[in-house]
Amino acid sequence: MTISKKIIGGYVVILALLILVTSVAYYALNQTQTTYNQFLNVDERLLESANELRSAAFAQQTYVRGVLLYPELQKVNQSLLQDNDRQYKHIFEKMRKLAGTSEGTIDLVDDLESLQEELGRAQQRAIRLALEQAHEEARAFTIDEFRPRSVALIEKARRFYEQQSTLLGKRRGELEKDVNLLTIAVVGVSLLAILTGLTIGFRLSRIITRQLRESIAQLSSSSAEILATTTQVASSAAETAAAVSETTATVEEVKQTAQHASQKAKHVSDSAQKASNVSKAGRKSVEEAIHGMHRIQEQMESIAESIVRLSEQSHAIGEIIATVNDLAEQSNLLAVNAAIEAARAGEQGKSFGVVAQEIKSLAEQSRQATGQVRTILGDIQKATNVAVFATEQGNKAVEAGVKQSSETDEAIRLLSASINEAAQAATQIAASSHQQMTGMDQVVLAMNNIKQASEQNVEGTKQAESAAQGLHEMGRRLSALVGGKAIQ
């Protein structure tokens, strides 16, 4: 696995741990918020509803006494009792909604509502007796029936309040315990993530550092060997260059001696002047013959190109003929099908028109293919004409070449006779001088090439030595960077 992949893997693990910590913390906050909302929206409001129920019960007692004791305020107290009854309904609706699916709380709310209904019926009878002017009976009923039920409702509401308060305290304790557990879980997961991240980072750094140290050690060892080798090569190349320089100087001296010997053979060139003049004429004739042969070659190439085009066009004709053959076969098949359909349907055959249309289309394709064949055949005819013309030109050029070759042969013959006259006197000197000069020129050229190669070799070895030194220095810096032992 590469270093970059290891680093990316470490970051991915640490990111996963951060996501885990964030998820746990988010879950803990949600749970705490949910429980807190339960307190605010349910438990506290249930306690508030219990107090409202007790207040409504006390107010009901007051309004009933007002109806019995103050006849002039009967209508006002009756209106207040009606408002109080509506408040009862509102309180019980709110308590049922807040109780939700809690069976114990629902049962208590049902009991309170049953008591309130009995109290409401007692209230209605007491008011009816008061309206009938049966004051004594109304007061006795109120004391014996209405008030005990009202007290029972108030007491029941008080016990409901106390029960909800106890339940609220219990839930508060459970909330504190849950919050403590969630806090411990978040802290534990956070510590685990931190320890895991530190462990991964430590191990990853050790692995990467170890690999870098191994690579740097190998790099430094290789660079040291390269540096030693290039130093030796540079020294040897410098010595070789010095030796080549000395040899080149010696060869130059030998060349000068050969030139001096060549000058001594100059008097031989006077007797060969006539041969030189004749050879010039022969050379001119040979050049003209060469030009003529070039023209012949160009003509032959033109003929070859024409033949190639003719071959390509012939190949295209073969393909088109195959296409025409296929179209003919399809037309024949369609004609047979059309005949069958016509015979089957009689005069009412409608498919014959479709088949006939297809036959027409195929016939059109055959016509187009035939036109292409005619066009290509015309191109072939043109190419053939060009080839014939080029052949004729080639024949003419060949005839001219033959004529020029004859003239060249005569000139060369005369040149040979003249050269034979001069060759007897200058054969040994000219041959030896020419060979010596040719050999010395080759030796000088070779020595110059060797000298240039030696200089380039010395320059290259210096550059290699400099590069090896830089590579060795880079290995030392990398070793120091990763905290390893300095490389000598």
Image (cartoon, rainbow, N blue to C red):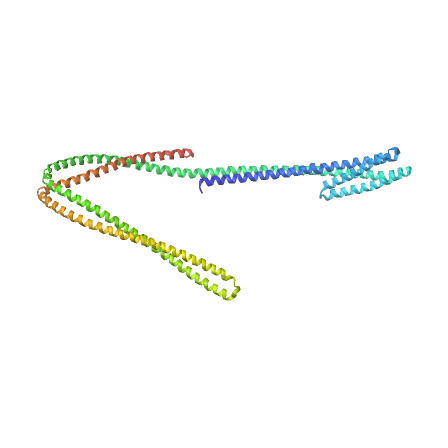
Q: Looking at the picture, tell me which residue is in the foreground, 314 or 251.
A: 314
User: Which residue is at a point 15% across and 44% down the rendered structure image?
Assistant: 282
How far across and down, in percent of the image, does residue 326 sit? 41, 60
Q: In the current view of this chain or complex, which residue is farthest to the front?
A: 347
Q: Quadrant of the C terminus?
A: top left
Q: Looking at the picture, tell me which residue is in the foreground, 6 or 398.
A: 398
How far across and down, in percent of the image, does residue 113 sit? 78, 42
User: Which residue is at a point 64% across and 39% down the rendered structure image?
Assistant: 31
Q: Is residue 488 visible?
A: no
Q: Is residue 38 visible?
A: yes
Residue 301, compared with residue 450, is above or below; it is: below
**Quadrant of the rendered structure where residue 369 is?**
bottom left
How far across and down, in percent of the image, does residue 222 sit? 35, 38
Q: Looking at the picture, tell me which residue is in the foreground, 399 or 415.
A: 399
Residue 336, compared with residue 433, is above or below; it is: below
**Quadrant of the rendered structure where residue 439 is?**
top left
Relative to 486, 54 lies left or right: right
How far across and down, in percent of the image, does residue 467 sit? 34, 35
Relative to 362, 104 lies left or right: right
User: Which residue is at a point 41% across and 37% down the rendered structure image?
Assistant: 213
